[in-house]
Amino acid sequence: MNTESTENLIDPYQTGKVKADSNVSSTDYRFEKHNPSVVTTPGRNESTSTVPSDLDSVAAERERRVFGVNERFLNVLLLGVGFMFSVGALQTCGMAQTVILHSVQDDYFQGSSTMGYILLAIQNAAQAIAYFFSASLCAVIGPKLALVAGSICISLNIACYLRPFTATVYVGAVVVGLGSGVMWAVQGHFVSSNSRSRTVERNMALFWGLLQTSSILGSLFYFLMLRGSEEIEPHIRWTVISTLLGASIIGIFVFSLIRQPWFAKLPRQYTQLSECPAKPFGPKEALVRTIRLAMRRDMLLLIPHFFYIGFECTMWASVYSTSLGYTKAFGIIRQSLVGLNGVFLGLGEISASIALMLISKRFHKKNKDTLVIVGMLVHFTAFYLIYLNIPSLSSTTPNDGLSFIGPKFVEI
């Protein structure tokens, strides 16, 4: 490596300290900070290392371009598009699964009015278990293969609704819970490993923007398919589920295009958002790290918050949409309202994200509690409006009961 004068060199990892030894290059010192196995000797331009890496080649790899697009940015883009198709299809299917299963009444399957809730509970339980073991799985098969395997689980679950059977829908709930849990864990790895400190916010905004757009598109499709239908006929169910299944398969293909080796291992740590490589760790160490993280004091303090988020997500992901589909007072639009609810839900998420980006610069870290309180007040207002508008039994069975201020049939 070429030696350069460090007389005015500021060390980017040492809060503004100036390098004193002019004989040690800045590149060597930076490599040493990330790799304890590298030993630099003052006055010499050589380093002894067990890591056969050259920072120049690492930097070149970081800036690699594919069809004129930065490889890191391309990976985040592919990740977002893959989630848009795969997870977007799962969200649309999950939002309507209770009313879809209840509509199937034949010799092979008798769907109950609350079966979708049971499947959602099984799915979430499997997903919680998957979070603990996802790091170990990625350490064995690599994050890219784990991501593709998780998306395949989503496709298998959606396919169960083409011709529901009691055994397949319950097994599908377990499979999709395990698969989606691994996917969400791996998602964090791909965003961080393909981001720098100056691009991480842009990449996260890109990813979540694509994901939130998917809920609008999938729900809008469902709304248009069920518009004017008071009941979900078999041919409509086939059309909707087949389309969602096709979208999830596209997601599998997009994930396979991510520019990373199929069996690449998870690095031991990420320093400065993966500016330099690190030694991979094994499945046992990954599991131990996960358990230690879960037992930290700050994580334990968040348990009440996690419970609240669980109830809130269940409300918007299944209960409220099912209540709309079960409220007969809405007439022939009640089934299509399940999809329309998802459209406005996606618009609300995108609007809130934009508003948060615009006002976040005005809030320091110590004032972020204000944003949390505002969000909770908005939640409570929404829940109270639902309580006033939806009959009390609409969440569990189709009924034509009355609520406090509605609902009323308005043709859309």
Image (tube, helix red, strand yellow):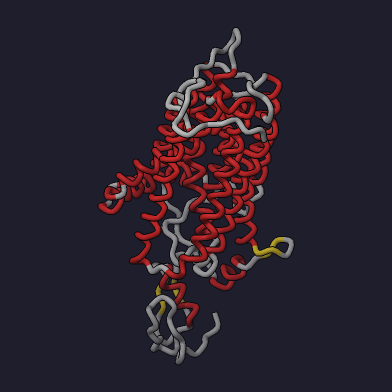
- In the image, taking residue 243 as reference, residue 349 lies left or right, namely left
- The residue under the point 46% across, 72% down is 31
- The residue under the point 27% across, 50% down is 301
Percent of width and height locating residue 296: 27, 51
For the N terminus, the image quarter is bottom right
- The residue under the point 67% across, 20% down is 233
Q: Nearer the viewer, residue 407 or 95?
A: 407
Find the residue positioned furthest to the left: 297
- In the image, taking residue 385 as reference, residue 335 lies left or right, namely right
* Among the 4 quarters of the image, the one containing residue 199: bottom right
Eyeballing the image, is 391 above or below 70?
A: above
Eyeballing the image, is 254 above or below 153?
A: below
Q: Nearer the viewer, residue 53 or 189?
A: 189
- The residue under the point 47% across, 34% down is 405
Percent of width and height locating residue 338: 58, 33
Percent of width and height locating residue 407: 53, 31
- In the image, taking residue 290 as reference, residue 7 lies left or right, namely right
Looking at the image, can residue 149 be seen? Answer: no
Looking at the image, can residue 148 be seen? Answer: yes
